[in-house]
Amino acid sequence: MTTTFVFHELYLWHDTGHAALLFPPGLTVQPGEHAENPETKRRMKNLLEVSGITDHLSLVKPRRATEDELARIHTRAHIERIREMSASGGGEASALTPFGPGSYEIAQLAAGGAIVAMDAVLSGGAPNAYALIRPPGHHALADLGMGFCLFANAAVAIEHARAMHGVGRVAVVDWDVHHGNGTQAAFYSDPDVLTLSIHQDNLFPANSGALDERGEGPGQGYNLNVPLPPGCGNGAYLEVMRRIVVPALERFRPDLIVVACGFDASGADPLGRMMVSSEGFRAMTEVLAEAADRLCGGRIVMTHEGGYSASYVPYCGLAVLEALSGVRTGIDDPFEPVIAGYGQQALQPHQADAIAAAEGLLAGIK
Ligand SMILES: [Zn+2]
């Protein structure tokens, strides 16, 4: 059994326009490249190809998620609004979330990519899966697209898994540098879906992702936020994996682990201020894979989220795919010595304090 890999060329045709990173052009903002442009994902796909790892993966084509599948998470009004705007040439799902013609269908294909990755793992055909999909999903709310996300890909796939595969408990580990607010909101009152987000403190969305957002009603205790100070590197992230993520998974005992896999905590990202290297992402994946082997038959489904360094994300992505598949391609990451050599890569005392503050959340998982 090999790792399943989901991709479609149309993911790269989702058009976010000519912003200056985030901001729409105007008389005082020169048109430039939107941060969430196709190049990062295209180059990741290309490096996977050139490295040879693609030959060792089971390549699966996505399908478009149906409106009913999207509606397990989203309101019909939201789905219809995105569909109409897309059909009339595009628009903005909300501030800073532009999209072009055809983006409705491409976003359906992204959510459907997460669904087929889920199917591959839950049917027993693959031990784990990676969906390299676009647009991303973890910021999208039931009735609103935001943060470059139109539909909540991972959440839609989780509801598919519960409805169609009878999956009981799902744990979501979100290591995108931004708070996974959409996934949190989707399952905030649900004790059967543990949502755990590791993110830079108060980065995006504003005032979102604090320690005290712990779930509500029967879901109380089943949402964990680990807000970290800027400047965390491999040492801090691995400490979070060891001291928060693994113990949380051991307490929760999921049937399946879903990873909202952003690479914007890398040391080269224009939107995040963290310092994780490709070896850091490899090590985090290995920790997770070991926990998954012990707890849920190795079942991991990763959905691609953010990550905006077109030069660096490919090496981070390759490291994660190597760790998931157990295949080593021998490709060296030329950035590794640079980023791993940054000062304060090891766990710093103030970072340990932030992690210790989140440890108290574990007791909420019954
Ligand atoms: Zn992000």
Image (tube, helix red, strand yellow):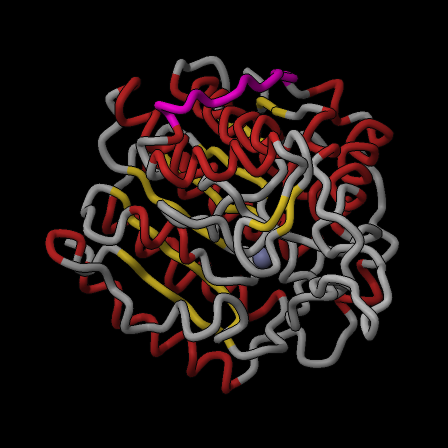
Q: Which one is in front, 117 or 68?
A: 68
Magenta stretch containing residue 230, yes or no? no
Q: In this image, 349 relative to 355: left or right?
A: right
Residue at horizontal 49%, vertical 49%?
A: 145
Spot the residue most to the left: 218
Q: In this image, 109 relative to 180: left or right?
A: right
**Which stretch appears magenta?**
58-69
Q: Is residue 239 above or below residue 75?
A: below
Give coordinates of residue 102: x percent, y percent: 65, 29
Q: Which one is in front, 183 or 282?
A: 183
Residue at horizontal 65%, vertical 44%?
A: 99
Give coordinates of residue 240: x percent, y percent: 45, 64
Q: Is residue 270 above or below residue 249?
A: below
Q: Is residue 130 above or below residue 287?
A: above
Magenta stretch containing residue 64, yes or no? yes
Q: Which quadrant of the render holds ligand 1? A: bottom right
Q: Which one is in front, 248 or 137?
A: 137
Residue at horizontal 62%, vertical 25%?
A: 5
Q: Which one is in front, 292 or 311?
A: 311
Spot the residue most to the bottom: 350
Give coordinates of residue 83: x percent, y percent: 52, 32
Q: In this image, 188 relative to 323: left or right?
A: left
